[in-house]
Amino acid sequence: MAEAVNASDQPLLVAEGLAKSYGRLNACRDVSFTLHSGEVLAIVGESGSGKSTLLQMLSAQLAPSAGRVSYRMRDGVLRDLAVLGEAERRFLFRTDWGYVHQDPAQGLRMAVSAGANVGERLMAVGWDNYGRIRQTASSWLERVEIDVARIDDAPRTYSGGMRQRLQIARNLVTEPRLVFMDEPTGGLDVSVQARLLDLMRSLVNELGLAAIVVTHDLAVARLLSHRVMVMKEGRVIETGLTDQVLDDPREPYTQLLVSSILPP
């Protein structure tokens, strides 16, 4: 995406001085940024750069060693995630957040039907009309390019690309305010990746979602994000608008990433 979205003055998510250490290993060091509604941020870097650790802290799945993450609740109050109870965090994942895993098996119930996977999210936010739930699940299968005739089939019978598209439907059906994506195209062949990326970009734009995407693939960052943060050895070494960073990187490490991964 070439341009940043028009964002509210009030950020949706705020990271301040985030750090995570495991003994002498500093997996993440002094990361700070803000994310606004409707904005997509890509976190890029090589394996071991700290991007997945950062994503886990941002999504309240891992407690930081230092710093804090704050999220603006629907009442407009910015809350420190560290002080939320377990029930409040689960509520966020049911209502406000989605999380797309690299391995769809982590984000789906593989033994129940595709329709049930999508419908469960609707039930979690209070839907109780079975006919409406099934109709909405069918509609979302169509939106993610899955044949509605497969609604009663379990994801274990789906291809890898279909599973990932189903996971996206499950996460977006309730139109969350923020979606975390951890290497969403990882492990898929090139043609399947291209189809999935086009679908994700279309849905993110249509729904006006805020999203944080972790990826080692700069082509994914270019297609999906408004801003990019480049990480190396746990630190953010460069950040800015996606096209600016990828077309004219300032830091030698970013220049190396761009020259070695992106086509000339």
Image (tube, rainbow, N blue to C red):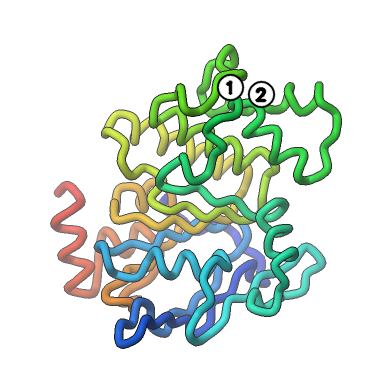
The answer for how far apart the CA atoms under marks 2 and 1 are is 5 Å
Q: To which residue does mark 1 refer?
A: 142
- Could you say which disc has been placed on residue 75 in the image? none
Q: Would you identify the image quadrant in which residue 150 lies?
A: top right
The kind of secondary structure element at disc 2 is helix
- Farthest residue, direction top: 149
Image coordinates for residue 24, horizontal then vertical, percent: 30, 87
Between 147 and 32, the one lying in front of the other is 147
Amino acid at pointer 1:
Glu
Image coordinates for residue 259, horizontal then vertical, percent: 15, 58
Answer yes or no: do the residues labelled 2 and 1 have beta carbons within 8 Å? yes
Q: To which residue does mark 2 refer?
A: 139
Residue beneath the point at 58% across and 76% down: 69
Between 23 and 28, the one lying in front of the other is 23
Between 144 and 20, the one lying in front of the other is 20
Q: Would you identify the image quadrant in which residue 139 lies?
A: top right
Image coordinates for residue 137, horizontal then vertical, percent: 67, 27
Q: Is residue 147 left or right of residue 129?
A: left
Image coordinates for residue 92, horizontal then vertical, percent: 69, 59
The kind of secondary structure element at disc 1 is helix
Amino acid at pointer 2:
Ser
Q: Is residue 206 above or below residue 8?
A: above
